[in-house]
Structures are given as structure tokens and as C-alpha cells.
């Protein structure tokens, strides 16, 4: 929702500002049209102002911060345009996974959600490394399920070797290798894969999870069929 308002500044002046409110609540993460309660220009020189809002889904309040970007004229008044920089406090979301994935690799679920929390807190320089570690847990735990007799070997095997050795399906192997490569790229002084990053890595990881989850579900279905045949 767009507003044209006049807010007092830290110097006591009335400053006309134009801004769009966030479309999602940082506390309940619902899609919203928040209620504007109050606004204040924090620093005219730096072009910073904040608004105090109430979510119309959970009724909690939060603060959105903005930066001035330019000037537009509305009627006879010149308003300072702005861009939203942050809304807080943030309630950290957790990514939920199926019971089969939780049973197969609880360490993957734990580390993935730690990386996800870092990303939500805008710790973008470290969350990629967390996602990379999560991939290693998922790949090695799944490899252990495929070849339990190789458990000790899998534990010390490099991630890419593990994928190439135990992942026979070409599409599954591609998803795992791409996730690992993008994760490794997040640990370098300079990123070597310039056309892909965290967004693509997360998409590959979730596709990898779904692929493995489908395989685990197929095993469950086979067990059900076999139990019916023997009954």
C-alpha cells in the first residue's frame, strides 16, 4: 500500500514522504496490508525514516525502515520517494521436511534451518556455507542408506566422490553436484560461478530433497505391497 504522508524529522521539521508498506508481516509472515500507526524521519542528511505499523493478520506491531531515493510531485507538494530496507522484529521461519527426511538425516534438517535462519537475518556471507554443509549431511546419510556396508568409507570420502560413487540416477547426481559446487563457491575468496548463487543453490537442494523423498516413499510403497503379498 502506498502512502503520501508528512512526518516530523529529528530537527522538528515536517517532511513529506512517499513510501510503500511491506506486503508481508516479519512476525507472522502473512500477506498483509498493514495499518500505519506512526512515522518519523530519523536523519534528513542520511535520508532515513521509519514507520510503525500493525499487522492486520496477527495484530502485532513492527517497524519498517526506509531510505530516500528521489523526489516526486503530488498536487502542490514535493514528496521524497523511498525504498524499504528492512522490517523488524523478524520471527525466524523454519523449513519443514517430511518424516522420512527427518529420519534419514536429522543433521541435514538441523543445519539447513540454521543456514535458513542466517539468511533471514541477512547474514548472506555465511548462509551459503551452512547450506553446503547441509548438503553433505543429506548426501552422505542417503549414501549410507544405499550402501550401509560402506558407512566408514562414506564418512571420510570427499562429497563429490561420494555423489559420483553412490548416485546412479543422472538427474539426482546433477542436482547433488550442482548443489555442492555452488556451496563450495560460497567459501571462496572470489566466487567462480558468477551466474548462480544462493537462490539457485536452494532450488537445487530442495529438488534434491524431493527426489530423495520420492525414493524413500517408493521404498515404503514396496514394503506395503510385499507385506500384502505375504499375508
Image (cartoon, rainbow, N blue to C red):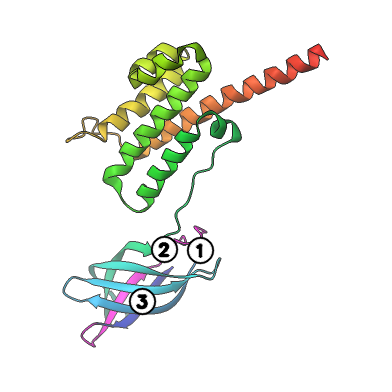
Instruction: Identify the residue under disc 2.
Output: 22
Mark 1 or mark 3, which is nearer the start of the sequence? 3
Mark 1 or mark 2, which is nearer the start of the sequence? 2
The quarter of the picture where the C terminus appears is top right
Residues at circles 2 and 1 in contact by the CB criterion of under 8 Å: yes
Q: Is 28 colored magenta in this rendering? A: yes
Instruction: Identify the residue under disc 1.
Output: 32
**Which callout, 2 or 3, points to the residue nearer the camera?**
2
Query: Residue at image x 36%, y 68%?
Result: 64
Residues at circles 2 and 3 in contact by the CB criterion of under 8 Å: no
In this rendering, position of residue 183 left or right of residue 145: left
Percent coordinates x, y for residue 1 in the rendering = 44, 68
> Range of the magenta residues?
10-32
Distance between the alpha carbons at the discs numbered 2 and 1: 8 Å
Query: Residue at image x 21%, y 30%?
Result: 192
**Which callout, 3 or 1, points to the residue nearer the camera?**
1
User: Considering the numbered disc 1 on the image, is that residue within a helix, a strand or a loop?
Assistant: loop
Q: Is residue 169 above or below residue 192?
A: above
Q: Is residue 93 above or below residue 129?
A: below
Foreground residue among 188 and 55? 188
* Crowd class of label 1 (few under 14; some 14 to 19; many from 20; radius 10 Å): some
Dividing the picture into quarters, in which one does residue 73 lie?
A: bottom left
Instruction: Identify the residue under disc 3.
Output: 4
Q: Is residue 170 above or below residue 34?
A: above
Amino acid at each position: 500500500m502506498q502512502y503520501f504522508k508528512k512526518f516530523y524529522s529529528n530537527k522538528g521539521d515536517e517532511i513529506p514522504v512517499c513510501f510503500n508498506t511491506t506486503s508481508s508481516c516479519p512476525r507472522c509472515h502473512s500477506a498483509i496490508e498493514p495499518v500505519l500507526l506512526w512515522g518519523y524521519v530519523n536523519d534528513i542528511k542520511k535520508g532515513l525514516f521509519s514507520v510503525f505499523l500493525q499487522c492486520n493478520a496477527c495484530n502485532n506491531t513492527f517497524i519498517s525502515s526506509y531510505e530516500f531515493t528521489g523526489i516526486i510531485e503530488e498536487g502542490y507538494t514535493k514528496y521524497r520517494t523511498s525504498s524499504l530496507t528492512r522490517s523488524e522484529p523478524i520471527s525466524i521461519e523454519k523449513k519443514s521436511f517430511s518424516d522420512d527426511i527427518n529420519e534419514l538425516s536429522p543433521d541435514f534438517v538441523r543445519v539447513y534451518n540454521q543456514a535458513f535462519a542466517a539468511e533471514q537475518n541477512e547474514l548472506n556471507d555465511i548462509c551459503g556455507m551452512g547450506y553446503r554443509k547441509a548438503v553433505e549431511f543429506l548426501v552422505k546419510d542417503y549414501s549410507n542408506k544405499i550402501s550401509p556396508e560402506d558407512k566408514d568409507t562414506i564418512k571420510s570420502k570427499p562429497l563429490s566422490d561420494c555423489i559420483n560413487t553412490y548416485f546412479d540416477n543422472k538427474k539426482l547426481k546433477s542436482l547433488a553436484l550442482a548443489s555442492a559446487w555452488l556451496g563450495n563457491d560460497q567459501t571462496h575468496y572470489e566466487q567462480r560461478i558468477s551466474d548462480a548463487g544462493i537462490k539457485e543453490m536452494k532450488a537445487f537442494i530442495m529438488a534434491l530433497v524431493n527426489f530423495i523423498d520420492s525414493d524413500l516413499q517408493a521404498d515404503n510403497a514396496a514394503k506395503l505391497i510385499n507385506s500384502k503379498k505375504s499375508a
